[in-house]
Amino acid sequence: MTTIVAKHGNFPSNVTANNEWAPLRSVIIGRADNSCFPYEAPHMIEATMPPRFHEAFKPANPFPPEIVRGAEEELGNFALLLQSQGVNVFRPAKVDWLQTGGYTGAMPRDGLLVVGNTIIESCFAWKCRVDEVANSLGNLLSKLGANPSVKVVRAPRPPSPDTLYNGILEDPGSHEWAINNSRPAFDAADFMRFGSTIIGQLSNVTNMKGVEYIQLHVPSGYKIELLDVNDPHAMHIDATLLPLRQGLMVYNPLRVTEESLRRHAAFKDWELVSYPFVKSVQAVEEATGGVPRFMTSAWLVMNVLVLGHDKIVVEEQDHEFVKWLEGRGMEVLKAPFRNVHAIGGSFHCASVDLVRS
Ligand code: ARG
C-alpha cells in the first residue's frame, strides 16, 4: 500500500485570523511522532489530568506506540482532508520528545495564538513545554516571519529558577489555581477569537500576567475579555466554547452559563445553545474501541474544527453530535481521531489557523 502524505504548504503564506469560523485557507496540523506523557510537578498534574492516569505522568514515559502510530496516521489523514478542501497545510518538524524531555507536537493550538497578522508564542506554565514551539515550529515561524506583513512574537525564557509554582495566589474571582501570578503564563488554547474581542479564561496554566502580556502584543483594536468559567480543573477553553458560525455558539453547560456569556457584548444577538448531550468518559472510550483518554474529559467532543461556510470536521464516532449539527444546517466531514484524543486533544487542539478570510 502506498501512503499518501500531505504536501507541505506553500510559502509565502500570509497570516490573518480574526475568528474561529471564517473560511479556513491556511493551517498548521500537529504531528504525533514520539509523543510522551508530559512530566510535570505533581500538583500541576493533579489540578488538570484525570486521576486514574496520574502515575503515568512521569519522566521519559512515551505514550503506547500503537496509540502514537494511530494518532500520526489520523493527523496525516486530517491534513489530507483539509488539503482536499483547498486549505494550505503546514506540519511541525519531527522531534524526539523522549530525548528533549518534552510532550508532543500534536497540539500546536496550545502554543500559538494568532490574532490578526500576529502570531504570539505561549509563555507555557508547564516546564516540559517551554521548548515545544522552538523545537517543532521554530523553522516554520522563521519562514512565516520573513513575510514583512506577519508579526511573530516569540516567548521570553521563563526566569531561572522559575517562580510560578511557589505558592498559589488567589485570582480576583477567588478561585485557587495551580500557578501564581509571579510571571506571565498562558496557553494559547485558553483564548478564542470573536472579531475584535478575544474571549479567554484564567486556568491552571494561564494567569493574569499572561493575559496582560497577550493584550500588550495583539494588534491595536483587539481587546481580551475574561469569561467566568466554573471549572477548577480548567486548562484550555476549547472544550467549553464552540462557535459554529457568526451568531451561533454551542457552550458547555457544566462550565458556563448563558448569563455569564451574555455579559460580553461580543455575544449580543448571538444564539447560545447548551451542548445537548452529556456522556461519561467511559462511555466515550467504549464507543471508540477502548482507547483511553489519558488527558481529557468527555467534553472533548466539542473540540472540533470549523472550516467556514458551515462546514465542520467531527470525529466519525460522534454520531449523535453529527446528526445534531446537520440539523443546524452544518455540512459535517467525518474523520477518525480517537488516538489523537488519547494524547490530549481533538481537531481544534491539533490545528492552528493561520489564515481565515
Ligand atoms: N481540558 C479540556 C477538557 O478536558 C480539554 C482541552 C483540550 N484542548 C487543547 N487545546 N489541548 O475538557
Image: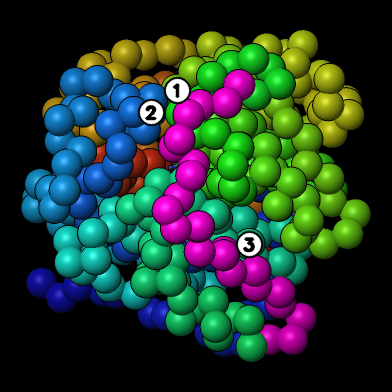
Whereabouts is ligand 1, in terms of quadrant? top left
**Where does label 1 land, which residue?**
233
Q: Residues within 10 Å of mark 1 (few under 14, many from 20)?
A: some
Q: Residues within 10 Å of mark 2 (few under 14, many from 20)?
A: many
Please tell me the numbered disc located at residue 48: 2
- Magenta span: 147-170
**Mark 2 or 1, nearer chain start:** 2
Looking at numbered disc 2 in the image, what kind of residue is underneath it? Thr
Magenta highlight on residue 154? yes
**Mark 1 or 3, nearer chain start:** 3
Left-right relation of 1 to 301 = left
Name the main secondary structure of what is drawn in magenta: loop
Discs 2, 1 touching: Cβ within 8 Å: yes
Q: Where is residue 322 in the image (x, y as percent from the top left)?
A: 46, 30
Q: Give the residue at x 38% y 25%.
A: 47
Q: Is mark 3 within 8 Å of ligand 1?
A: no
- Check the picture and name the quadrant holding the N terminus: bottom left
**Where does label 3 land, which residue?**
120
